[in-house]
Image: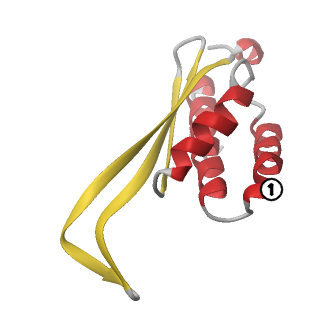
Amino acid sequence: MWYSEVSTVRIRAVEARLVTIPLNPPRRIARRNLRRREYTLVRVRTEEGIEGLGFCLGGAPIPMFIRHIFAPQLKGRSPFETERIWEEMYHEILLLGRRGAGIRALSAVDIALWDIKGKVTGQPLAR
């Protein structure tokens, strides 16, 4: 895709799924016994069919943040507005907490947006 076409790329869908990986044998971290690890996987798809993937460690609240709070405000937006989108998502979750599930959800979406930017421009994320 040519750089001039970048401005026309728009987000069509945002999906979030919880994946649980059982740990056998269970692990112990500090005073907690872990029988499983939970990850949230995020897929952001553009109108052109380009998919960005993101993920984070964390359970059921994270996909709910993404589906109900972030997804509605992302549809129709350019994935190239990563800084502006990050700020808007951050302000959206301020009253819910500045740490934990909200910020993890934000990070997973942000990773997916950067993945799209790299794919559209043909550049590694480091650039």
78 displayed left or right of 57? right
- Which of the 4 image quarters holds residue 30? bottom left
Q: How is the image coloured?
A: secondary structure
Q: For residue 79, say whether it is visible.
A: no
Image coordinates for residue 122, horizontal then vertical, percent: 57, 27
User: Is residue 63 placed above or below 7 in the rendered structure?
Assistant: below
Q: Nearer the viewer, residue 106 or 50?
A: 106
Q: Secondary structure at mark 1?
A: helix
Location of residue 9 in the rendering, given as x and y in whole percent from the top left corner = 69, 16
Residue visible at 56% across and 36% down in the picture: 115
Left or right relative to 17: residue 27: left
Amino acid at the residue labelled 1: Leu
State the residue position of label 1: 94
Q: Position of residue 17 (x, y in %)?
A: 43, 39
Q: Is residue 22 above or below residue 2?
A: below
Vertical side of 18 occupied by 22: above or below? below
Q: Note whether residue 7 is visible.
A: yes
Q: Quadrant of the C terminus?
A: top right
- Tell me which residue sits at (34%, 61%) in the image: 37
Q: Residues within 10 Å of mark 1 (few under 14, many from 20)?
A: few
Residue found at the far left of this picture: 25
**Does residue 60 appear left or right of residue 25 in this picture?**
right
* Image quarter of residue 5: top right
Q: Is 24 left, or right, of 18 in this rendering?
A: left
Residue sitting nearer the eye, 103 or 79: 103
